[in-house]
Every structure is written in structure tokens, then in C-alpha cells.
Amino acid sequence: MMKGFSYHVAEIGVAYREDIAEVKEAMHEAFDLLMQSEWREMIVDKLDMHGVTAFGDSAVMVRARIKTVPGGHWATGRAYNELIKQVFDRRGIEIPFPHVTLYMGEDKAGMSPPLRVKNEVRTESGSDDRPVLITDAE
């Protein structure tokens, strides 16, 4: 048996450099835009902002909830996510993706050795152009 409502739970990851107050403001702006669209018929309450819920490897997680009519959370959530992306892009708020940092060590003076990167065509595995790490040993 279904309750008389559903929830879309928005778990939005933002870069550590972002101002959380601005992120929350942007999430409210996206909700206001959602309420000006055809999706307003599915929404039964104002945005329920939970705030920061976790510190991940590359993102601070911010949670909000949208209460909808039964079963309306899927479509409403997709529309909200699209608006979040638009608003964040316009405001310059970064939605991070995984990054790789190479640590090459350091000497006793705290200096890192130079790293040479060479772009070459790899013909033995096809003809894709990819950066290749060339060490001083080669």
C-alpha cells in the first residue's frame, strides 16, 4: 500500500571550495523554477532543505527533499536535477567528478622531481593519441 505522498531526495555533490550558503540558495532557486513549470502539480510542499550530510572524497554532499504526490518523485526528481545543473552552471558552482593526483615523492629538501609527459601515437595498440608518461629511465 502506498502512502499519500512520495519524496524525491536530492543528494547533490559540490566542490569543497563552494560556499554552502550559496549552494543552498541555488538549490532553492532551482526549486522555484520547478514550481513555475508543469511539475508544480506534482509537488505538495515547499523544499525541505537538510543541508550538508557528508564529506566525500571529492565532494561535499548537500541534501534536500521534495514531497510529491504518490509516485511523482521520479519524474519530479529528474526535472529538479536538470534545473540544478542549469542553475549551478549559471552561478559557476562546481559539481565535481573524480580526479587523479600523481604524487612523485620529494627529496629531503622538500622538492619534487621533474615529471616529463610526452604525447605520442601508440601504433602497437591502435592509433589513439594519448599522453604517455616518459621517465628518465627510458
Image (cartoon, grey):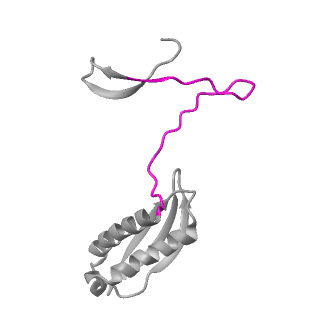
In the rendered image, the quadrant that contains the N terminus is bottom left
Measuring from the top left, give residue 94's x and y in whole percent: 47, 58
Measuring from the top left, give residue 13's x and y in whole percent: 47, 60
The image shows residue 9, relative to residue 38, as above or below, that is above
As drawn, is 41 to the left or to the right of 105? Answer: left
74 within the magenta span: no
Q: Is residue 37 visible?
A: yes
As drawn, is 64 to the left or to the right of 16? Answer: left
110 within the magenta span: yes
- The answer to which image quadrant residue 67 occupies is bottom left
In the rendered image, the residue lying farthest to the right is: 109
Residue for point 45% across, 47% down: 98
Which contiguous range is marked in magenta?
A: 92-119
Q: Is residue 6 visible?
A: no
Give the total of numbered labels.
Answer: 0
Q: Nearer the viewer, residue 88 or 45?
A: 88
Q: Nearer the viewer, residue 108 or 48?
A: 108
Residue for point 75% across, 26% down: 109
Residue for point 31% across, 28% down: 129
In the rendered image, the residue lying farthest to the top is: 138
Measuring from the top left, give residue 49's x and y in whole percent: 50, 77
Measuring from the top left, give residue 97's x and y in whole percent: 44, 50
Q: Nearer the viewer, residue 129 or 66?
A: 129
> Magenta-highlighted stretch: main secondary structure?
loop
